[in-house]
C-alpha cells in the first residue's frame, strides 16, 4: 500500500508542475484533494487493511495530504504572481492610476473645544475631575441649595429614571459637592478643579436647545477666595481662549448655589464688540454662569463657611463652538451626520 501512496505523490506533484492557470489548478485540487479525490480514496481503503498496518498507513496518507496541500498553496501563489506580471506587461493594470484615498478620522468639534478648555484650565492650575452622568437627586438639586419643591428646580427640566431619586444630571454642578467631599479631606484642604461632561435636559429640541449638551464646571475653594479672584480668573481664561485683549463683563444674576451670582459676557470675538448678527448687535456674548459658592453648599461639601470660601462657574462649550464655526443649529452636534462631522 505504501507503493500507492508514493505513486500518488509522484503523479500529483508532476501534474501540478504542468499547471499554468487558475482553472487547471482548481481541477487538480478536486482530482487529488477533493472529497471524492485520489487522497480520499486512499483514506477509504483503511477499512480493508490488516489491523496492525492501519496506524502506519493512516499516518502516511495524512502526511501526503498535508504535503499536497502545501504544494497547492505554493503553486497558487506562483501562478498569481505570474498572472500579475503578465497583466502588468500587457498594460491591463495601470499602475499610474491614483490610489484610493485613505479617509482620516477627526475629532468631534465638541471634543476639540472641550480639550482646548481643559488645556487652558489645566495650565491655570485646575485639576480635571470627571463626575458621574447618572446622579442622585440630592446631589443635582438638594445639596446645591435646591430643596424639593424649590421653584428654581423648574429652571431645568429633568430626565428621571424609574426611581425618582435618580436622574440624568441637568448640569455639572453636582460635581462640586462630589469634588469637595472627595478632595476636601473633611473640609481642610483647598481645591481647584474643572468638571467637564455631558448634561441632559428634557427640553423641546430646537436649533438652539438640545436634550444633551456639554458643560465645563469650575470650582475653587480656599481660605481667602473673593469675588476679585473669580473675576480675575475668568478674565484670564477669556484672554487665553478668545483673544489676548478680550474684555469680559459681569452681570448680576441668580443661581441657588451661588451668592452673589453673575452671568459672564465676553466681548464678541467675531466683530470685536462693534456689533454683528452673532452678538445680536450688542457687542457681547454670554459665556458662563458664575458666583461665590453659597454657604449652604460649602457646608454640604464639608467646609466651614466661616473659614472657607470659593467661587464656581459653568460654561457651555457647544455655544462657543457654534459661534466660532458659524454653526447655525445645535442639533448637528449629536445628529451623527457625517457631512457635518467631516468638515472638522
Ligand atoms: N449650573 C448652572 C447652569 O447650568 C451654571 C452655574 C455653575 C452657575 C456654577 C453658577 C455656578 O445653568
Image (cartoon, helix red, strand yellow):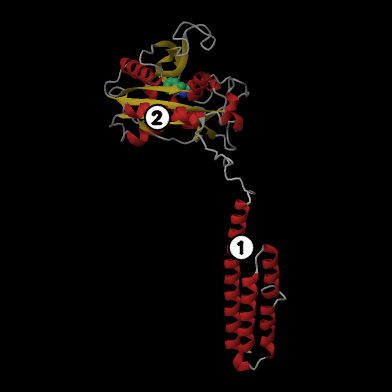
When asked about the image quadrant of residue 290, the answer is top left
- Quadrant placement of the N terminus: bottom right
Nearer to the camera, 203 or 15: 15
- Judged from the image, the secondary structure of the residue bearing numbered disc 1 is helix
Q: Tell me if residue 256 comes above or below residue 28 in the rendering.
A: above
Earlier in the chain: of badge 2 and badge 1, it is: 1
Classify 10 Å Cα crowding around label 1: few (below 14), some (14-19), many (20 and above). Answer: some
Residue found at x 57% / y 79%: 63
Residue found at x 46% / y 12%: 268
Nearer to the camera, 130 or 160: 130
Picture disc at residue 118 = 2
Q: Position of residue 284 (x, y in %)?
A: 46, 10
Classify 10 Å Cα crowding around label 2: few (below 14), some (14-19), many (20 and above). Answer: some
Residue found at x 63% / y 51%: 90
Q: Where is residue 7 in the image (x, y as percent from the top left)?
A: 63, 84
Residue found at x 60% / y 51%: 88
Given the current orientation, which residue lies at the most extreme right position?
36
- Judged from the image, the secondary structure of the residue bearing numbered disc 2 is helix
Given the current orientation, which residue lies at the most extreme front position?
90
Amino acid at each position: 500500500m505504501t507503493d500507492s501512496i508514493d505513486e500518488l505523490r509522484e503523479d500529483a506533484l508532476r501534474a501540478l508542475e504542468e499547471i499554468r492557470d487558475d482553472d487547471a489548478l482548481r481541477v487538480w485540487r478536486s482530482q487529488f484533494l477533493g472529497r471524492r479525490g485520489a487522497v480520499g480514496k486512499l483514506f477509504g481503503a483503511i477499512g480493508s487493511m490488516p489491523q496492525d498496518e492501519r496506524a502506519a498507513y493512516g499516518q502516511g496518507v495524512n502526511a501526503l495530504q498535508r504535503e499536497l496541500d502545501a504544494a497547492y498553496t505554493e503553486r497558487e501563489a506562483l501562478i498569481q504572481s505570474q498572472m500579475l506580471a503578465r497583466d502588468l506587461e500587457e498594460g491591463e493594470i495601470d499602475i499610474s492610476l491614483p490610489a484610493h484615498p485613505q479617509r482620516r478620522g477627526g475629532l468631534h468639534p465638541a471634543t476639540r473645544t472641550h480639550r482646548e478648555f481643559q488645556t487652558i484650565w489645566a495650565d491655570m492650575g485646575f485639576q480635571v475631575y470627571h463626575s458621574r452622568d447618572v446622579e442622585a437627586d440630592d446631589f443635582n438639586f438638594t445639596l446645591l441649595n435646591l430643596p424639593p419643591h424649590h421653584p428654581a428646580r423648574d429652571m431645568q427640566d429633568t430626565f428621571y429614571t424609574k426611581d425618582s431619586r435618580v436622574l440624568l444630571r441637568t448640569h455639572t454642578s453636582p460635581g462640586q459637592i462630589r469634588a469637595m467631599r472627595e478632595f476636601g479631606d473633611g473640609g481642610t484642604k483647598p481645591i481647584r478643579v474643572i468638571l467637564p461632561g455631558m448634561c441632559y435636559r428634557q427640553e423641546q429640541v430646537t436649533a438652539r436647545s438640545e436634550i444633551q449638551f456639554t458643560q465645563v464646571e469650575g470650582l475653587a475653594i480656599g481660605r481667602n477666595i473673593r469675588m476679585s479672584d473669580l473675576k480675575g480668573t475668568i478674565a484670564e481664561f477669556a484672554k487665553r481662549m478668545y483673544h489676548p485683549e478680550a474684555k469680559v463683563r459681569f452681570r448680576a444674576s441668580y443661581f441657588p448655589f451661588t451668592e452673589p451670582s453673575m452671568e459672564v459676557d465676553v466681548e464678541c470675538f467675531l466683530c470685536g464688540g462693534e456689533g454683528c448678527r452673532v452678538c445680536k448687535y450688542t457687542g457681547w456674548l454670554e459665556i458662563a454662569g458664575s458666583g461665590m459658592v453659597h454657604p449652604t453648599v460649602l457646608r454640604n461639601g464639608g467646609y466651614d463657611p466661616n473659614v472657607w470660601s470659593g467661587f464656581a462657574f459653568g460654561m457651555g462649550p457647544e455655544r462657543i463652538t457654534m459661534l466660532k464655526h458659524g454653526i447655525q443649529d445645535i442639533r448637528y452636534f449629536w445628529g451623527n451626520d457625517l457631512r457635518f462631522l467631516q468638515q472638522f
